[in-house]
Image: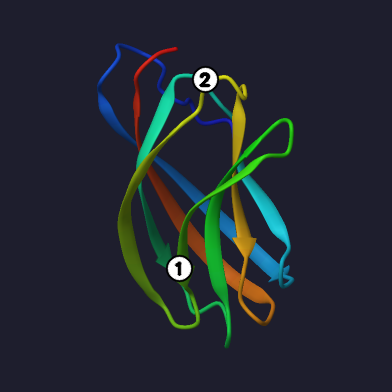
Amino acid sequence: MKETFYKGAAGNLSLHLVTISLAALATEATKVVTESLPIGTQITGVRIVNEALGTGTKLTAQVVSHEGDTTDLVEFDTESAGNGGAFIKPAYIGDEGPSDLVVKNTGSSSATGEVVLQLEYRYTGY
């Protein structure tokens, strides 16, 4: 969690990589992946590389403001090992203040295993 999050010249497309170890993440439970994504960040895509996390598992990448407002970015089926990605409608972190990148188990059973989450973003400034 101590990786540097790029906040340099506006417009550079960047990729933030995070490896997550899940130990029986219960249905509807969340795990904070990266804290305090800076104001001025525009998220443009999300990718995932995952182990088989268990039957009936799905992970949803979310951005959660410090006030508790949640924005779902994309949901991935993680029942079997694989990888996937999605370009999304850009999500901008602005007036709501620094926000956390979170994964939520939106499947029907607990998720256990390793996941690499890749957040595509550009820092546009505030």
Indicate the position of residue 82 as horizontal and vertical percent values: 36, 74
Badge 2, how many Cα within 10 Å: few under 14, some, many 20+? some
- The answer to whether 39 is drawn above or below residue 105 in the figure is above
Q: Is residue 124 left or right of residue 54?
A: left
Indicate the position of residue 98 as horizontal and vertical percent values: 60, 24
23 and 107: which is toward the camera? 107
Q: Which mark is residue 115?
A: none
Which residue does the image show at 34% across and 68% down from the upper left? 83
Type of amino acid at the residue the image marks with label 1? Phe
Q: Which residue is mark 2?
A: 39
Q: Which residue is mark 1?
A: 76
- Specify the quadrant that holds the C terminus: top left
The answer for how far apart the CA atoms under marks 1 and 2 are is 26 Å
Q: Is residue 23 left or right of residue 55?
A: right
Badge 1, how many Cα within 10 Å: few under 14, some, many 20+? many
Type of amino acid at the residue the image marks with label 2? Ile
